[in-house]
Image (cartoon, rainbow, N blue to C red):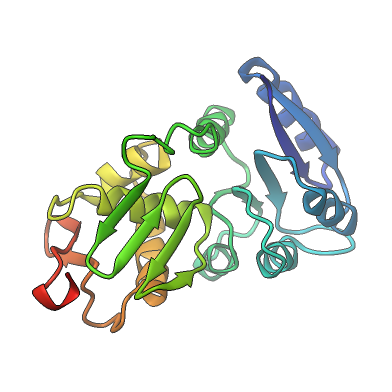
Amino acid sequence: MNRRVLVIEDNADIGRLIELQLAPIQCDVRWVADGLAGLAEAERGGYDLVVLDLMLPGLDGLEICRRLSSRDVRVPILMLTAKSSELDRVLGLELGADDYLTKPFSVAEFVARVKALLRRTTGATAKAADPLVCVGALRIDIARREVRVDGAVVELTAKEFDLLLHFARAPGRVSSRAQLLQQVWGYGHSGYEHTVNTHINRLRAKIERDPENPQFIQTVWGAGYRCGEPSPQDL
């Protein structure tokens, strides 16, 4: 079965290029050139991925991210941006984008990012053998993609969920930033380690009782990160 990809991009050349490049990996592409129309189409649902330009007529990409998040539309988002400042990239991630590419981008890298984002929507992670992963007060329902801390539901983006699940499945195991890029994002490119840092910080802010003294996602200086073993009071 082909995967459905919504492309919200006002540049016709880029829109056609994306359609051309995604056809060989069995993707049906719906291309929309306007922000408002793109938001309405995303809200209809049924898409496995949204490729979203930052600068759009009608409604910009950041506002689309914000509205999709507020309306609980859960779909991986790959943001395309002509802006190269760290602030723009971080803001996009903060508002719900799962990954980003700065224009101009490599076609090969774009396809690799798309493949990585689509892999986690195949249902492969919802294994019957481990439908629930627990670490102390943290509960992860894989099939429902639901996270609870101390019984309260925590809203995570698709990438934040995958990152947390990676850690929770192997408490105590240390993963470097490069390993996380390969194992969670599905690609290994030097220079993108700050993407990992941003997601770790956002995840801590949502699940830790004290983000400055994290218990679930701990830093191992000079090595990477690990999921901390639960303390006796958390068992």
The quarter of the picture where residue 198 lies is bottom left
Q: Nearer the viewer, residue 193 or 144?
A: 144
Question: The N terminus appears in which quarter of the rendering?
Answer: top right
17 w.r.t. 73: above or below: above
Classify 140 as above or below 18.
Answer: below
Confirm whether residue 131 shows in the render: yes
> Considering the image in quadrants, where does the C terminus appear?
bottom left
Give the quadrant of residue 152.
bottom left
Which residue does the image show at 76% across and 36% down from the upper left? 14
Furthest residue in direction top, as rendered: 24
**Picture residue at 86% right of the left edge, 43% below the top:** 32
Q: Nearer the viewer, residue 102 or 157?
A: 157
Compared across the picture, whether 20 is left or right of 116 comes to: right
The quadrant in which residue 21 appears is: top right
- In percent of the image, x 58 and y 62: which residue is there? 96
Give the x, y percent position of residue 227. 20, 59
Q: Position of residue 181 (x, y in %)?
A: 35, 44
Tell which of 158 and 51 is nearer to you: 158
How many numbered badges does the structure rendering display?
Answer: 0
Residue 192 visible in the current orientation? no
Name the residue located 83 percent from the left edge and 64 percent from the top edge.
59
Q: Is residue 136 shown left or right of residue 185?
A: left
Q: Is residue 52 left or right of residue 234?
A: right
Q: In the image, is residue 23 above or below residue 77?
A: above
Residue 125 sits above or below residue 72 on the image: above
Percent x, y for residue 185? 41, 42
Q: Position of residue 126 (x, y in %)?
A: 44, 38
Q: Is residue 163 rendered to the left or right of residue 40?
A: left
